[in-house]
Image (cartoon, rainbow, N blue to C red):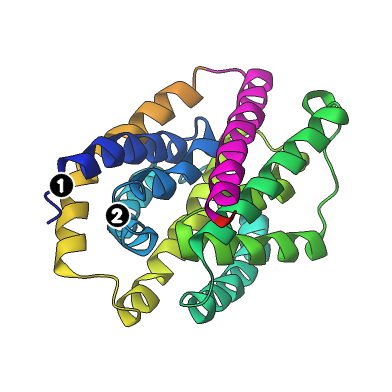
Amino acid sequence: MIDDPVFYFAAVPAVLLYGIAKGGFAGGFGIVAVPLMALAVPVPQAAAVMLPILLVMDLAAVWAYRRSFDRGLIRLLLPASLVGMGIGTAAFRYLTPDAIRLALGVIAVAFVLYRWAMHAPDAPPAPRSAGKGWLWATVSGVTGFIAHAGSPPLQVYLLPLRLPPAILVGTVAVLFAGLNYAKIVPYWWLGLLSLQNVATAAALVPVGVAGVYIGLWLQRRVNAKLFYTLIYAFLLLTGLKLFYDGLRAIY
């Protein structure tokens, strides 16, 4: 188990925020977990510690939203996300985490600015597009495998659909649960699931589960318009952070 106190100063809020996002509130905050933990440990180790925690949080999130998800979207997005995960597995040893952060930041910030410029909170629902769904789900599979940061690319496709908040959160919860469990074998194959990483994850699991139920409580008490406004705001903030961190590291 990791015994550096600095790691836990970063890891506890990171896991709590990810849990709140899993519960359906402030979904954009989920993508900052690995970067926060990476302040104290290498990015691959941070991702490895997060995976067992996510597996437990996924069970709580799927149970909470077991009656609130879109099966049609799952059938569309899951195969493409698995393709992206395969690409992420093949590229894991070659893609730098800083390049991933930079790319995620650009996607998140550009998308939010575009949607706000188009008055997104009041925009009519966009039509479903299989091509766009496959594109963004594949990108989400890549970034989700490398840094558990599949949310921004997927939101580029999902948010314009203007799904009811519970359906949006439930669909994301079911999709990412399937993907996270599919990561177990490639993470083991890459040598990331060491005893130290798994033991550290076990110590942080209660924090993550608490976060899920906090997020669930908040999501059910925020109206739909405010919910989407907050999602866009949090996505913008996390996008800016990822962009800054990636740019600073590269240059």
Residue under circle 2? 41
- Magenta residues, as a range? 222-249
Per the image, label 2 sits on a secondary structure element best described as: loop
Q: Is residue 32 magenta?
A: no
For the N terminus, the image quarter is: bottom left
Q: Amino acid at mark 1?
A: Asp
Residue under circle 1? 4
| Residue 249 rendering spot, x and y as whole percentages | 52, 52
Q: On the rendered structure, is 121 left or right of 19?
A: right
Main SS, magenta region, reads: helix
Nearer-the-camera pick, 42 or 196: 42
Which quadrant of the view contains residue 243? top right
The CA span between labels 1 and 2 is 10 Å
Q: On the rendered structure, is 147 left or right of 164?
A: left
Q: Amino acid at mark 2?
A: Val
| Residue 138 rendering spot, x and y as whole percentages | 65, 67
